Image (cartoon, helix red, strand yellow):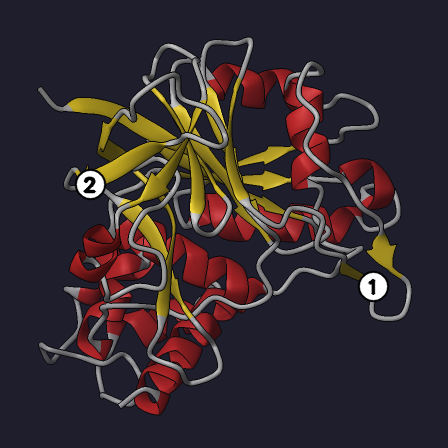
Amino acid sequence: MKKEAVVIRNAGSHFYLSRLPEWNPFPAVLRGRVRLKRSESTNPVAVGDKVQYETPDGDISEENPAVITGVTDRSNYIIRRSTNLSRQSHVIAANLDQALICVSLFFPEIKLPFLDRLLVTCEVYKIPAVIVLNKVDLYRNEAPDAVRYFTDIYAGAGYRVIQTSTLTGEGIDEVRELCKGKLNLLCGESGVGKSSLIKALDPGLSPKTGDISEAHLQGKHTTSLYEMYRMDCGGFVIDSPGLRGFGLVDLEKEEIYKYFPEMLATGDKCRFIPCTHTHEPGCAVKEAVEKREISPERYNSYLGMLEEDKKFR
């Protein structure tokens, strides 16, 4: 009889599993032939994967781990491609109920194309995405227009934006309520405060936190592995290493606009179908951008993705 569990920690070649919703972590290793079956990505097994495993003779321990023998088909996953023109891809997490994308307008300064790539990937794999605008205590009073403009862009595109501060506690209860009973991925660039946010959501948890590099005002990597935590509110959250680049995977350029909700709603009004929304006359998307019904920033992200797609062909 096969035994099943969920991967809750991935540290390279070593894993921890638990039979969710029970929380009973135990160590495991990967059988070699499983690695070959999923060779399209750098990691055949990701946190959130449901796996089959065999138990060794004797009690399971670090010296005598369980053996992962198979991986159940994923309901969804977040995957990224290296941004150095490599075709290698990496699965960040699997079988998610939602993704919480943590951003900060400043310290470090936000990169909208990065955020939009993450959102497009969530749309592709049908993972509900929520934007957590963190560290608002640092810049709301000094840059209220920037906070308002950012929120308008993404609320206008159809996304929920929650403003949070781990210092003042603002928005923490709202995020915690959103996490209840769900498997959540918390992801974002380095330095945006993901680990501090997890601590604020559940003070009993202790992921690593780090400072901002003064030289580049970028975050230092503090999380070096992918790890799931059980939350007191009844949900689970996966903490991921800070991402410095995010390349799209498995997307034809003709499809990209479909994963911008505001562009999809407008694109069927174009004079010519199909339309790339770049140069065609009578393009409803370009007209909506000119009227600022679609934000120029989101449209520029779309153009950047089209250009990125060419680099990999």
The numbered mark, 1 or 2, whose residue comes first in the sequence reads: 2
Real-space Cα distance between discs 1 and 2? 40 Å
Q: Residue at x 57, y 50 (%)?
A: 188
**Amino acid at pointer 2:** Val
Secondary structure found at label 1? loop
Q: Find disc 1 in the rendering and name its residue.
A: 217
- Dot 1 alpha-carbon crowd within 10 angstroms: few under 14, some 14 to 19, many 20 or more: some
Classify 16 as above or below 146.
Answer: above
Q: Residue at x 44, y 79 (%)?
A: 304
- In front: label 1 or label 2: 2
Near-viewer residue (96 or 107): 96
**Amino acid at pointer 1:** Leu
Q: Quadrant of the C terminus?
A: bottom left
Near-viewer residue (209 or 248): 209
**Residue 225: image x %, image y %?**
56, 46
* Circle number at residue 140: none
**Residue 172: image x %, image y %?**
65, 21
**Residue 76: image x %, image y %?**
24, 43
Classify 234 as above or below 1.
Answer: above
Residue sitting at the far front: 57
Q: Quadrant of the N terminus?
A: top left
Left or right of residue 306: residue 224: right
Classify 33 as above or below 58.
Answer: below
Near-viewer residue (88 or 163): 88
Q: Residue at x 25, y 32 (%)?
A: 50
**Residue 70: image x %, image y %?**
18, 40
- Dot 2 alpha-carbon crowd within 10 angstroms: few under 14, some 14 to 19, many 20 or more: many
* Circle number at residue 71: 2
Residue 114 seen in the figure: yes
